[in-house]
């Protein structure tokens, strides 16, 4: 790791002041520190967000869920109120990495990073979540921009995510047996504005909504409605783990499981 | 450079470290606590697990300065003199180790797991929760046996008083 200067921010305003130039925000560090160790990232300064109280916690008020950016995967996975309101996201958080990763990694860090195989981006997109930063709020549809790309401007801080609990939601993940990241993961929801199905781990431009799955499930929100649906493989990832055709088949298989879970 | 201080195995310690110093290096090189191991550079093997404020975390993926002010527990802090912690004793009893390289991390992970599951553990849960601990020798069977046995033992010894906290 190259030399770096560490700062512990006390508030979001304090962090924004420090987050200039080649500085980077540090949340759980479960992505950033491994990248710094292998010199794939070399920030001049690290601004630690984990001591900012305003960024933490989960509130469920009626049908509205708000999760602070600094909330850990472990906290999401074990929150009793959230388990009642939206079990699918609680289940998803419990599938991320391993217990020690979940003790530190945060939802804000995960979506700011937008790894093409991360779990939360699929949930945010399918839930039609709103991402709030220290500058603005924007819909998930506008936030995720491709591989490791988001709409965040330099120095902008994700402060929370929020969403309206849909009537139905489910997630299914086929983990890569070595890394446990999603080789393909599908999050489906059925809410006021219809059906949304978001796919992670498969798109060669990162997380995306599958038109084919959404169209089929809009007719009938059941796994049987997906029988024979063709998912095009043209813009899917192809690597040593899986061909794009295999990923297309996984999308369908995971979508069926996710719908079954949502209906259970 | 930063001045840091923390409590390690019940003892207050301080030091001056480069900000890029990993917690595992602070423990091993500054404090001489070499029981915490480094087995990978991808944050996947779990040989470096310690408890930070009561939760299992990877000391290879934390800067020492990040946890300044915290309470750290390492493998060296578990035994009470010659009396092994129940999880250590179970690993010995059930041959939960061969070369021993992964063992400190396995044991810190097991204690964290047992603390998080006061309702008790079954084999499937133990296997799922050991996701982040890689062992190249044992094939895991005896590790799983040891964790299950320790979990029962710890439940017995704390019956009626609630489960013992922390390590
Ligand atoms: C062994 C292992 C297995 C994993 N498995 C999975 C998995 O199965 N699924 C999965 O989804 N993820 C997985 N992860 C990644 C994990 O979920 C990370 O915690 C997450 O991707 C990043 O969150 P963090 O809080 O650790 O962020 P950090 O590593 O601290 O930061 C990540 C990036 O986001 C920026 N950032 C952080 N917080 C903010 C903020 N509030 N506002 C703006 N920018 C910010 C940082 O500057 C950095 O660029 C795994 C990680 C490891 C080490
Ligand atoms: S050394 Fe920390 S996870 Fe491998
Ligand atoms: S006993 Fe050798 S790595 Fe586990």
Image: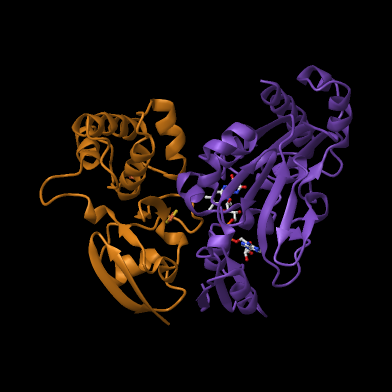
Would residue A42 be visible to someone looking at this image?
no
Q: What colouring method underlies this structural image?
A: by chain
Question: As displayed, is residue B18 above or below residue A212?
Answer: below
Q: Is residue B51 left or right of residue A23?
A: left
Residue at 29 percent of width and 65 percent of height: B7
**Which is nearer the eye, A68 or B76?**
A68
Q: Colour of chain A?
A: purple
Q: Position of residue A6 (x, y in %)?
A: 50, 76
Q: Identify the image quadrant of the C terminus of chain A.
A: top right
Q: Position of residue A147 (x, y in %)?
A: 75, 56
The chain drawn orange is chain what? B
Would residue B41 be visible to someone looking at this image?
yes
Rendering quadrant holding ligand 1: bottom right
Residue at 75 percent of width and 39 percent of height: A243
Q: Position of residue A205 (x, y in %)?
A: 80, 51
The picture quadrant where one finds residue A85 is: top right
As drawn, the residue found furthest toward the front would be A62
**Which is nearer the eye, A103 or A246?**
A103
Residue at 27 percent of width and 47 percent of height: B167
Q: Position of residue B17 (x, y in %)?
A: 38, 78
């Amino acid at each position: 790791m190259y030399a770096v200067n560490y700062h512990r921010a006390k508030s979001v305003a304090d962090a924004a002041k420090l987050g200039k130039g080649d500085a980077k925000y540090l949340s759980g560090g479960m992505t950033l520190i491994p990248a710094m160790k292998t010199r794939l990232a070399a920030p001049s300064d690290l601004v630690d967000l984990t001591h900012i109280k305003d960024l933490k916690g989960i509130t469920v008020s009626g049908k509205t869920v708000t999760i602070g950016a600094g909330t850990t995967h472990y906290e999401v996975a074990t929150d009793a109120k959230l388990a009642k309101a939206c079990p699918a996201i609680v289940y998803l958080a419990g599938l991320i990495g391993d217990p020690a990763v979940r003790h530190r990694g945060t939802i804000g860090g995960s979506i700011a990073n937008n790894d093409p195989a991360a779990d939360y981006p699929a949930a945010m997109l399918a839930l039609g979540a709103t991402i709030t930063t220290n500058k603005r709020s924007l819909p998930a549809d506008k936030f995720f921009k491709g591989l490791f790309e988001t709409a965040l401007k330099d120095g902008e801080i994700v402060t929370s995510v929020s969403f309206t609990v849909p009537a139905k939601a489910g997630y299914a993940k086929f983990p890569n047996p070595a890394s446990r990241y999603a080789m393909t993961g599908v999050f489906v929801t059925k809410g006021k504005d219809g059906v949304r199905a978001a796919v992670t781990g498969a798109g060669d431009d990162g997380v995306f909504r599958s038109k084919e799955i959404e169209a089929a499930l809009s007719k009938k929100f059941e796994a049987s409605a997906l029988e024979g649906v063709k998912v095009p493989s043209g813009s899917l990832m192809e690597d040593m783990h899986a061909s794009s055709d295999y990923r297309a088949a996984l999308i369908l298989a995971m979508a069926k499981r996710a719908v079954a879970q949502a209906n259970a | 450079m930063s001045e840091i201080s923390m409590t390690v195995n019940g003892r207050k310690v301080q030091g001056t470290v480069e900000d890029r110093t990993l917690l595992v290096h602070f423990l091993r090189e500054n404090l001489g606590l070499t029981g915490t191991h480094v087995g990978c550079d991808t944050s996947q093997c779990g040989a470096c697990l310690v408890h930070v404020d009561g939760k299992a975390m990877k000391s290879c993926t934390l800067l020492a300065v990040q946890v300044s002010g915290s309470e750290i527990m390492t493998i060296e802090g578990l035994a009470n003199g010659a009396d092994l912690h129940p999880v250590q004793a179970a690993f010995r009893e059930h041959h939960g180790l061969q070369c021993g390289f992964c063992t400190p991390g396995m044991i810190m992970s097991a204690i964290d797991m047992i603390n998080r599951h006061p309702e008790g553990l079954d084999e499937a849960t133990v296997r799922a929760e050991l996701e982040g601990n890689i062992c190249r020798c044992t094939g895991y069977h005896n590790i799983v046996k040891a964790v299950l046995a320790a979990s029962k033992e710890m439940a017995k010894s704390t019956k009626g008083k609630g489960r013992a906290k922390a390590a």
